[in-house]
Amino acid sequence: MTQVFNFSAGPAVLPKEVLQQAASEMLDWHGSGMSVMEMSHRGPEFISIYRQAEADLRELLAVPANYRVLFMQGGGLGQNSLIPLNLAGRKPQPATIDFVQTGSWSSKSIKEARRYANVNVAASGEASGFTTVPPQDTWKLSDDAAYLHVCTNETIDGVEFNFVPTVQGDTPIVADMSSHILSRTIDVSKYGVIFAGAQKNIGPAGLTLVIVREDLLDSALAICPGVFNWRAVADAESMLNTPPTYAIYIAGLVFAHLKRLGGVAAMEQRNIEKARLLYEALDADDFYRNRVALDVRSRMNIPFYLRDESLNDQFLAGAKARGLLQLKGHKSVGGMRASIYNAMPIEGVHALVDYLNEFAGR
């Protein structure tokens, strides 16, 4: 098989070792005679898979004991609706939710939250074309917000937070970490809620992780659907309905794989090096442009543009011929985008750098 490197923003590349293990266990998981896809989610076989996956995730992120881990469906966009439904009840109605708008995903979050609460955009990077994170001393936070919502890595715009926000009083921080969870060390205790779609650094599409502090589980609005009420999901240990069992299984394999590689701290060092190599190549001359401010450039999602965009199709065709796949930028912003998640080996980044230099030279 020809060697390819998949730079898709999601669904994204998975570790080769994980795919090989899943393939070997496809027809018969650990002598059970069943594929994981065929198992009852309440049977002892799958329960053991689920419990190990949760335990490994807690170890990787050092999740405190007073936080619950929920394995849910609906993706990141689904949680953008479910978060106000689950948290806006913390305050008298209509509640106010604070947002920091740093790109396409935080903008989607704002749109969804307006269905259920008042929204205060405390700061926005829209005027700069979402190329930076507004300094915290410019934020106009509410006095009594139900929570503050941030997207700590904007998958489309390539902006990543390099700090943990500070808040007033008991306002919890809700962080959308879909595209950089497990890529860098974090202090979970600084956040009230962390959520992430799985299809970038964790596993296949269809699974969404929610890490929520226990005292926030009873803040849902009355209109919150029962199947998506975090308290109900937590009490049922994510088995309120049939969970995305195979996606949880793959996530568990990824978690175990990351532990064998040295955990999140080791992955962070690898990611720093991969991003350094790619940004240095893009910055080497003015043939390519990355528009994001230097101090908030994402390590995971790197958008870039050719100086002469009439060459875009030629660039992509040449990349595909070399096994460098899924480099076309999001349709809303154009250009190119290289997503270099945990599972992207450094060899893939070297191959892309070589091609960038070759194409510019031509």
Image (cartoon, grey):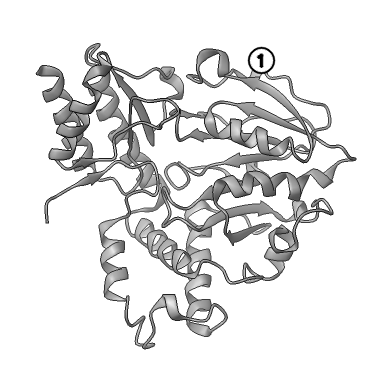
**Direction from residue 220 to residue 350 in the image, left or right:** left
Question: Closer to the camera, 112 or 339?
Answer: 112
Residue 101, image quadrant: top right
Helix, strand or loop at mark 1: helix
Residue drawn at x 61%, y 34% is 150
Give x and y (percent) for residue 263. Answer: 39, 52
Residue 115, image quadrant: top right
Quarter of the figure with the N terminus: bottom left
Residue drawn at x 22%, y 32% is 316
Question: Closer to the camera, 68 or 98?
Answer: 98
Which residue position is annotated with label 1? 138
Give x and y (percent) for residue 55. Answer: 52, 65
Q: Amino acid at mark 1?
A: Thr
Q: Is residue 63 visible to the viewer in this orientation of the structure?
A: no
Question: Closer to the camera, 79 or 321?
Answer: 321
Q: Is residue 316 above or below residue 287?
A: below
Quarter of the figure with the C terminus: top left
Q: Is residue 266 above or below residue 354?
A: below
Question: Closer to the camera, 195 or 276?
Answer: 195
Q: Is residue 193 above or below residue 35?
A: above
Q: Is residue 245 visible to the viewer in this orientation of the structure?
A: yes
Give x and y (percent) for residue 87. Answer: 76, 46
Give x and y (percent) for residue 254. Answer: 38, 59
